[in-house]
Image (tube, helix red, strand yellow):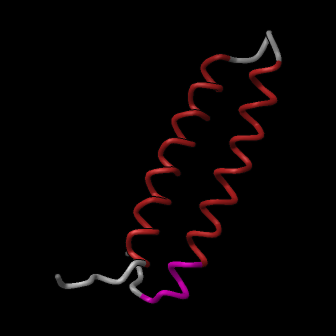
Amino acid sequence: MISSDPAVLARQLTELREEHRDLDAAIERMSADPLCDQLQLTRLKKRKLKLKDMIAYFESKLIPDLDA
């Protein structure tokens, strides 16, 4: 369950961004190796995309709704 507490959301967002950054570094290292496992590389890239979507979701949750 996703909390509506801004402090909890901010902490989760920070953790997701950190994991995304770590995956980016891992993908870059693996891409430099011509003998890397392509299936593993593809899985890491998919995970990174999923994290990107989750980050966008959490960022939108932190923005207050403004009535027009």
Q: Is residue 12 left or right of residue 58?
A: right
Vertical comparison of 9 with 25: above or below: below
In the rendering, at what x and y percent does residue 24 appear? Answer: 70, 41
Is 32 rendered above or below residue 10? above
Which one is in front, 39 or 64?
Answer: 64
Q: Is 20 displayed left or right of 31 in the figure?
A: left
Q: Is residue 52 left or right of residue 63?
A: right
Image quadrant containing the N terminus: bottom left
Q: Is residue 29 left or right of residue 50?
A: right
In the rendered image, residue 7 lying in the magenta stretch gets the answer yes
Residue 66 pos. (x, y %)? 26, 84
In this view, the residue farthest toward the top is: 34
Residue drawn at (81%, 20%), measured in percent from left and top?
32
Name which residue lies at 35% across and 83% down: 64
Seen as rendered, the residue at the extreme front is: 68
Magenta-colored segment: predominant secondary structure: helix
Q: x%, y% of residue 35?
A: 79, 10
Q: Is residue 51 magenta?
A: no
- Note whether 2 is above or below 45 in the view shown: below
The quarter of the displayed image where residue 17 is located? bottom right
Q: Position of residue 28 (x, y in %)?
A: 76, 31
Residue 38 picture quarter:
top right
Name the quarter where the C terminus is drawn. bottom left
Q: Nearer the viewer, residue 61 or 46?
A: 61
Q: Which residues are magenta?
A: 5-10
Please identify the quarter of the rendering in which residue 31 is found. Answer: top right
* Point 57% across, 31% down: residue: 43
